[in-house]
Image (spheres, helix red, strand yellow):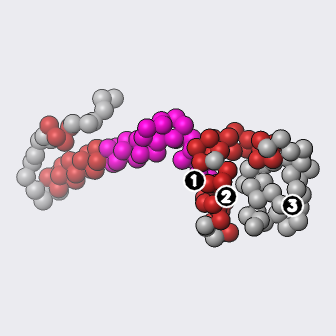
């Protein structure tokens, strides 16, 4: 099964995968070459360390051909995050972003209350400690 759509084009030298496998050149049977050309060796090394070549090929074979490039980019991102934080990986980033969203939502709520007050639609209210909690001092 050939994952890449290389239209019979054979690269002049090895791709990152073939270089890792100590091949001198990348032939038309290379499934991963289109996604990991030689200049993306570092990306391939990250994905290889986290997922391994067999898992990478299984993952790519399980998605539609038009989604494979996006899948590879996602695997690269996930691998980099997992190598940076082996315990939490991308979950750590997600938690941080969720906390930032909650803080911004509270700030927006406080601003909307002030707008309603200045428009004469509501009672004045002072920000509570929970409104101010999480705000960064500038």
Q: Residues within 10 Å of mark 2 (few under 14, many from 20)?
A: some
In the rendering, which numbered label is found on residue 7?
Answer: none
Q: Secondary structure at mark 3?
A: loop
Q: Residue at x 61, y 54 (%)?
A: 55
- Looking at the rendering, the stretch of residues picked out in magenta corresponds to 73-101
Gap in Å between the C-alphas at discs 2 and 1? 14 Å
Q: Secondary structure at mark 1?
A: helix
In the rendering, which numbered label is found on residue 57?
Answer: 2
Q: Residue at x 57, y 41 (%)?
A: 80
Residue at label 3? 28
Please tell me whether mark 1 or mark 3 is closer to you in this view: 3
Seen from the viewer's position, the closer of residues 50 and 92 is 50
The magenta stretch spans residue 95: yes
- In the image, taking residue 117 as reference, residue 105 lies left or right, namely right
- In the image, taking residue 106 as reference, residue 21 lies left or right, namely right
Corner quadrant of residue 58:
bottom right
Could you tell which of marks 2 and 1 lies nearer the N-terminus? Answer: 2
In the rendering, which numbered label is found on residue 74?
Answer: 1
Image location (x, y in percent) of residue 122: 10, 56
Majority secondary structure in the magenta region: helix
């Amino acid at each position: 099964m050939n994952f890449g759509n290389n239209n019979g084009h054979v690269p002049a030298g090895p791709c990152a995968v073939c270089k890792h496998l100590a091949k001198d050149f990348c032939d038309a049977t290379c499934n991963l070459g289109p996604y990991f050309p030689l200049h993306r060796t570092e990306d391939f090394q990250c994905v290889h360390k986290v997922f391994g070549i067999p898992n990478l090929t299984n993952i790519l074979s399980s998605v539609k051909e038009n989604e494979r490039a996006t899948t590879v980019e996602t695997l690269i991102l996930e691998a980099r995050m997992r190598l940076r934080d082996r315990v939490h990986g991308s979950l750590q980033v997600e938690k941080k972003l969720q906390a930032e969203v909650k803080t911004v939502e509270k700030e927006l709520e406080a601003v909307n209350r002030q707008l309603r007050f200045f428009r004469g639609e509501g009672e004045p209210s002072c920000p509570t400690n929970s409104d101010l909690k999480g705000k960064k001092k500038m």
